Amino acid sequence: MIDKKLLQKGSLDELVKKLKSGGTRVFAPVEKGGKVLFDEVDSAAAMARDYVQTTLSAKDVILPRCEEMMRFTTGQGTVTMEKAPDLPPPAVVLGVRPCDARSIAVVNAVYLKDYNDALYKSKIDNTTIVGISCAKCDEYCFCTSVNGSPGDTEGSDILLTEVDGGNYLAEIVTEKGKALAAMAPELFTAAGSEDKAKHLADVKVQFDLKAVEKKLPGVFDGEVWITQSLRCIGCGTCSYVCPACTCFDIQDETDGNRGVRLRCWDSCGFGQFTLHTSGHNPREVQSQRWRQRIMHKFSYQPDQLQVTGCVGCGRCSRACPVDMNILQHIKDIEAQ
Amino acid sequence: MQDKIRQKARELLSSGAVKVVIGYGEGTGSRVRALFIQRPEDADRLIMDERCVQNLAVYLTKHEVRAIGKPAIVAKMPVIRSINQLAYEEQFNEGDIAVIGISDSDELVDLPDLTSVREYAAKNPLLLTAEERAELDKLETMTREERWNYWLEELSNCIKCYACRASCPMCYCPRCTVEVNQPQWISVPAHEIGNVEWHIMRAMHLAGRCVNCGECTRACPVKIPLRLLNQRIIADIAVNFGQSEDYALAAFNPNDKEDFIR
């Protein structure tokens, strides 16, 4: 049973200040030169307003674009390893959209299911997600087609929905959410009879997810991938703005006999993705890489990890320099 | 103009002169996208309006596109300049491509061969707009520290998605310097030094070659003003190494200054 409370308009700022004074890092969407990005904030006043979606997701907090795995020193036939630096202080990510909160289940499935990735686990365990429901959407949004919704609580520890008077209905979803609310119990007052649904965006269902999942294995060798990807220029923008893309590459940076091992984001859009040492690449043309992106999210992950690897945030379509629109492409595949 | 492009595309495809026409068509919402028209009856999908700004020359070196057969390309001035530069760098030979040229005054330009492309590009030299000059001048008014901090702040948003590289017609190397790791020339991760090294290295490789189409800036998901960085570094290289058709990093002259090597 989700506990419902009311957070007064001005209380959000008090909450941020309280968290900060306790040493917690608070991340929230901030507008910077025409884009909205998650950044550390000191007050709720710094938070961006009136945007549909942030340019990048909050993935950077739990799965950074590059992160240190370990340090090493090489000697005469020896390698001495030092552990990665200590964990940063706990983080609260404020203003995460429900689609993005839902993507955490995908990242968890990859990093914690078969293999318990300690580096990732330490970060996700240390992070509390305060989601915020969507009052508006745009033509790129399709959360409801992939089992989400603009007021979905899944993945959020607390979900805020802006209701009448600029106050927030606070749904306290998890134990982590309870712990956060307990840090400032005076700010979370009793909720009245707020009608959450009337404050949510209307996101229409655009395709049948189960039908797409069923269809994909049969079109693996189809022409559709070539038709769709001819204009793809092979950058990694779609993967890097995606909250649910999890592929990484490992880079060693050395200076003399000392070095650092870093885990960095990788993308199936790149020509070097899955390139073997022999020179062979199982995905040697862009259509095969594009197919990998769609199959991975809508066929392999549902099959192997029981999660859909796409949350319908629409970022890849908004950011793509050449209008590779994932919603249109999925609908075209469904119609085949 | 749109009708003339469609007519020309239809003719080229019907006669078998080309296998594919690379042009612009309607995309999703109000966006336009690159189209690859392979049948004369599809030529009517081609459009031309003020939204059609992507530098389509990027597709001339993509092997997936080249595999279709000889292309014709809808080419406004930045694309014509790109074709000229790519031809100079021997990325294709005479007869490999056809050009549907469009002048700045919105007229079809007859560019039957690469020589005519070169002559047309020479007649229309690349000049920065007053707005671009003003932006560059603004950088000049900063102190060195201010300018460094400005770029560090902008580049801190870089996620190394390489949209700048992928969207650029001049970035056609099958293996980019950033992907050469024995030895590692530049730092790959998207951290501070990695981002700074990457963008400065790219700008240096573009010196004397960049057609200032602005595609890198448009493609960047975090809106880094790369065009400004590139133009600034290109200007520095021109001052220090001279301006010539041979771009600074490929040309070798025994009289080149070496006093900076220590």
Image (cartoon, rainbow, N blue to C red):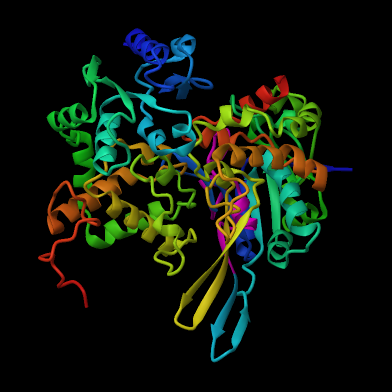
Q: Position of residue A288 (x, y in %)?
A: 61, 40
Q: Residue at x 29, y 53 (%)?
A: B205
Q: Could you tell me what secondary structure mostly forms the magenta stretch?
A: loop
Residue B68, percent across and down?
A: 48, 29
Q: Is residue A197 magenta?
A: no
User: In which quadrant of the rendered image does the N terminus of chain A lie?
Assistant: top right
Q: Residue at x 18, y 71 (%)?
A: B260
A61 magenta-colored: yes
Which image quadrant for residue B259?
bottom left
- Where residue A23 sits, quadrant-wise, is bottom right
Asked whether B170 or A58 is in front, the reply is B170
* Front-lying residue, A151 or B126: B126
Is residue B145 shown above or below B174?
Answer: below
- Residue drawn at (67%, 43%) of the image: A100
Viewer-proximal residue, B142 or A79?
Answer: A79
Question: From what the image shows, is residue A47 above or below residue B65?
Answer: below
The stretch of residues the image draws in magenta is A40-68
Query: In the rendering, at what x and y percent does residue A215 appear?
Result: 77, 28
Q: What is the residue that sits farthest to the bottom in this orientation?
A: A76
Picture coordinates of residue A41 (x, y %)? 54, 54
Extreme-right residue of the structure:
A1
